[in-house]
Amino acid sequence: NAGVTQTPKFQVLKTGQSMTLQCAQDMNHEYMSWYRQDPGMGLRLIHYSVGAGITDQGEVPNGYNVSRSTTEDFPLRLLSAAPSQTSVYFCASREKWAYEQYFGPGTRLTVT
Amino acid sequence: EDQVTQSPEALRLQEGESSSLNCSYTVSGLRGLFWYRQDPGKGPEFLFTLYSAGEEKEKERLKATLTKKESFLHITAPKPEDSATYLCAVLIKGGGADGLTFGKGTHLIIQP
């Protein structure tokens, strides 16, 4: 199993550009989440999904959209990038009845 | 407000010098407490889940314990390869978001 995979690994955007961060898992996990990690802030939840077709907001959802059309994929869209969205983004997944989450390798995003 | 506080922020030890990392939490209802290890440029790697006070888990040189207010990650006779940032996270009961609330981590350096 590849586990949780994320692409791209690095990305530089200009303010106002849009892009999609990809996340996929091959463990048949129902639950998937997106976090951002900033220095001195710890990991914070952006959006999460409890199954295909079901998504909800986390702690810091503004400026981000998600959708979940399949169990495997959970893309994160930045609609109009801002410098405040410069961060490292992690996708995670877990089984429905087990609470430990498994993280991908991350995407480092810089917005100039 | 739910909070997770880790201490110390950084810790430098000599190889073989045992110590403990602390994670204190104030949450409305604990569903589980999690320890992760994060290496530079990588995603968090799951170590342990603790569900109730008095519970202990062990893995190689690491042992995690839980009380009603805090958790400790004990490191016995550490080696340089144990150098990493250790993250503590909690999952609370009844919360609308299915996400972990993370502490800011303890950056551990083991010197040979």
Image (cartoon, rainbow, N blue to C red):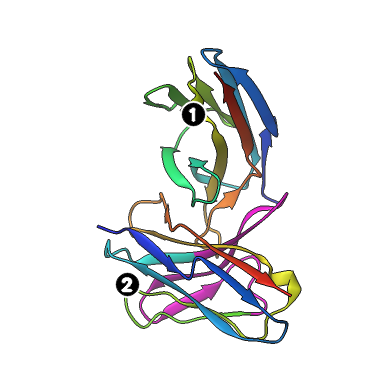
The quarter of the picture where residue A108 lies is bottom right
- Tell me the residue that label 1 is attached to: B82
Q: Amino acid at mark 2?
A: Glu
x and y percent of residue B70 in the render?
Answer: 60, 31
Q: Chain of mark 2?
A: A
The quarter of the picture where residue A3 lies is bottom left
Give the residues drawn in magenta, as a range: A34-63
> Image point 70% across, 34% down: which residue?
B9
Question: Can residue A16 be seen from the camera position used here?
Answer: yes
> Image point 68% across, 31% down: which residue?
B10
Q: Amino acid at mark 1?
A: Asp
Helix, strand or loop for disc 1: helix
Give yes or no for residue A99 being in the magenta stretch: no
The quarter of the picture where residue B58 lies is top left
- Tell me the residue that label 2 is attached to: A72
Q: Quadrant of the C terminus of chain B?
A: top right
Along the viewing direction, whichever of B59 and A105 lies nearer the viewer:
A105
